Amino acid sequence: MLPAGARLTRRDEFATTMRRGRRSGRSHLVVHLDVAGSDVPRAGFVVSKAVGNAVVRHRVTRRLRHVVAPRLATLPAGARLVVRALPPSATASSAELAGDLDGALRTALRRLSPAAAQ
C-alpha cells in the first residue's frame, strides 16, 4: 500500500504529469515521469475500462501499487509518476508487471536527465 503522502490524487496533477512528463511504454503499461518541486516522489495509476471489469481493474491496480511502492524511493525528489495500465496487464503476473515497470522507468529516467540539465 502506498502511504497517503505518496499518492497523486488530483486531476490536475495527473494531467500535468502526463502532458509534461517523459513517457516510456512497454507491452503491459506506460509510465509518465515528471519532476516538479522538491517534495517526496508520488505515484498515481490509470486503469481504464479497456483493461477489464471492476474486479480485474482493482486487481491490476493492487498489483501495480505493490510493484511501485519500493521503487518510489529510487526516484528523484519531487518526481511524479503516472502508471497507465494497458489491456494486456489484465492477464499479466506481478513479475511481468515489475519487469515492464523497471524497463519503462529506466527509459523515462534516462529521457528526463537531459531535460533536467537544461
Image: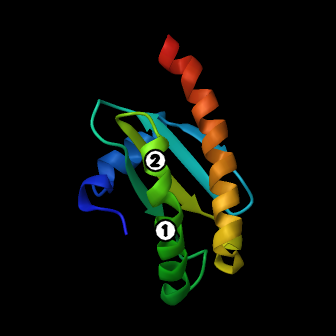
Q: Is residue 18 visible?
A: no
Residue 89, position as x, y percentages in the image? 66, 71
| Count of numbered labels shown in the rendering | 2
Question: Separation of disc 1 and disc 2 at Cα?
Answer: 14 Å
- Visible residue check, residue 8: yes
Find numbered disc 2 in the image and state the secondary structure of the residue it sits on: strand
* Place of residue 101 in the rendered image (x, y in percent of width and height, measured from the top left): 62, 54
Residue found 52% across the figure and 70% down from its top = 48
The residue depicted at 29 percent of the width and 58 percent of the height is 9
Q: Position of residue 50 (x, y in %)?
A: 60, 74
Disc 1 residue type?
His
Q: Mark 2 and mark 1 in contact (Cβ < 8 Å)? A: no
Q: Which label was assigned to residue 66?
A: 1
Q: Residue furthest top?
A: 118
Q: Residue at x 65, y 65 (%)?
A: 97
Left or right, 117 with reference to 52: left
User: Percent x, y for residue 71?
Assistant: 50, 51
* Up-down relation of residue 49 to residue 111 (above or below): below
Q: Quadrant of the N terminus?
A: bottom left
Q: Amino acid at mark 2?
A: Leu
Q: Earlier in the sequence, mark 1 or mark 2?
A: 1
Marks 1, 2: nearer the viewer = 1
* Image position of 73 with respect to 110: above or below: below
- Please indicate whether residue 92 sits to the left or right of residue 114 in the image: right
Residue on which disc 2 sits: 81
Residue at x 57%, y 49% (from the top left corner)? 31
Q: Is residue 101 left or right of residue 20?
A: right
